[in-house]
Amino acid sequence: MTTDATIGKARDTLNSSWYGFMADRNLSTAFPDWRTDTAGDGTPLLSGRVSGRGAAHAVAQFIRLGKIGLPVDGDTRPSIDYDTPGRVAYVWRFYGVWVELWHPDGAVQDVVDVPPSSVPETPAPAPVKAAEPVLSAPVPRRSLISRASGRLPYTRRNKTPKETTTR
């Protein structure tokens, strides 16, 4: 059975990995708030909630780019879990302990009691008509032979002074 020392070792390893990852990538998301619980199969569960600005990005990058090893036989790679409404979790087995690192789902908003506003609502702006494209006059086409290149001193019709002299 897993002891408290193993849970502490898993938590300390994950904490140092998280700190190193956040410092390397210059992210400013809050540190996971770890809680210990028991999983459905009776093994210990270490659950960490990440909150703050960019929590979803930070957790996804930590799982994808972080160096989470498999130090003990029976450990598993992280997998995503949407079972609990209102949160996105990554679950894996680490040092024989189930680890759940999660963040609140961005689609679910917390309901806050706010007194009604005394400011009247402004009417919606009128829809803007799209401008119609303006057609320009066709570009006149000239023969390529009649125009001299900027690099050449004469056109094809004129002969160079060297060609006009006779011996």
Image: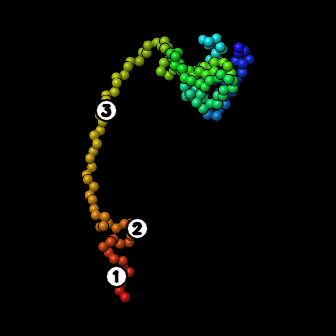
**Residues tagged 3 and 2 counted as in contact (Cβ below 8 A):** no
* Mark carried by residue 128: 3
Q: Residues within 10 Å of mark 3 (few under 14, many from 20)?
A: few
Q: Residue at x 38, y 72 (%)?
A: 153
Among all residues in the image, which is located at the extreme front?
Answer: 73
Q: Earlier in the sequence, mark 3 or mark 2?
A: 3
Under circle 3, the secondary element is: loop
Q: Quadrant of the C terminus?
A: bottom left
Is residue 52 visible to the viewer in this orientation of the structure? no
Q: Quadrant of residue 51?
A: top right
Q: Going by the picture, which residue comes out furthest to the right? A: 5
The numbered mark, 1 or 3, whose residue comes first in the sequence reads 3
Q: Residue at x 38, y 80 (%)?
A: 162
Where in the figure is residue 16, as x and y percent of width and height?
A: 69, 27
Asked if marks 1 and 2 touch (Cβ < 8 Å), the reply is no
Quadrant placement of the N terminus: top right
Alpha-carbon neighbours of circle 1 within 10 Å: few (<14), some, or many (≥20)? few
